[in-house]
Image (tube, rainbow, N blue to C red):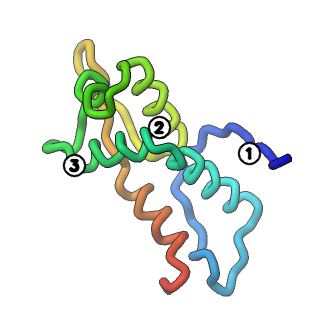
Amino acid sequence: MPTMLPVLTDTAPICCEPIGSAAALSRDEAEQLALRLKALADPTRLQLLTALLTAPDGTACTCDLAPAVDLTEGTVSHHLKRLESAGLVSKERRGLNVHYRAESEAIHAIARALNAGCC
């Protein structure tokens, strides 16, 4: 039976060497990276993140995102909360709507950590 990852809310930036570099990942670094990868390991969340990254002003509300992924606003909110807990998106209330923004630095940090050929 696979080991379940702990449910953490961690929005701190990832600060680890690329996987495959001379330094091994510490347990804490591995858990931080796994938390973010787990949040991304869902097709809907990847679609939502893509929609946010390509939005004209870089933000979108659930009312705009729900039709894009053909889900209810409640389900979209759930997925966005998971992405927010992993530090991959941030939110801002504007009147009655909540607008989300992809945290590009967090996404780039994941890419750097997974880039075994980077120095």
Q: Amino acid at mark 1?
A: Leu
Q: Which residue is mark 3?
A: 54
Of labels 1 and 2, earlier in sequence is 1
Residue 90 sits in which quadrant? top left
Residue under circle 1?
5
N-terminal of the two: label 3 or label 2? 3
* Disc 3 versus disc 2: nearer the observer: 3
99 with respect to 72 (left or right): left
User: Which class describes the residues within 10 Å of circle 1: few (<14), some (14-19), or many (20+)?
Assistant: few
Query: The disc labelled 2 sits on which kind of residue?
Result: Glu
Query: In the depicted view, which residue is nearer to us: 42 or 32?
Result: 42
Say whether disc 3 or disc 1 marks the residue closer to the N-terminus: 1
Q: Can you tell which quarter of the image residue 55 is in? A: top left
Work out how far the residue at label 3 is from the one at label 1, CA to CA, in angstroms.
31 Å
User: Looking at the picture, which amino acid does disc 3 mark?
Assistant: Thr
Image quarter of residue 47? top left
Depicted 64 relative to depicted 22: above or below: above
The residue tagged 2 is: 84
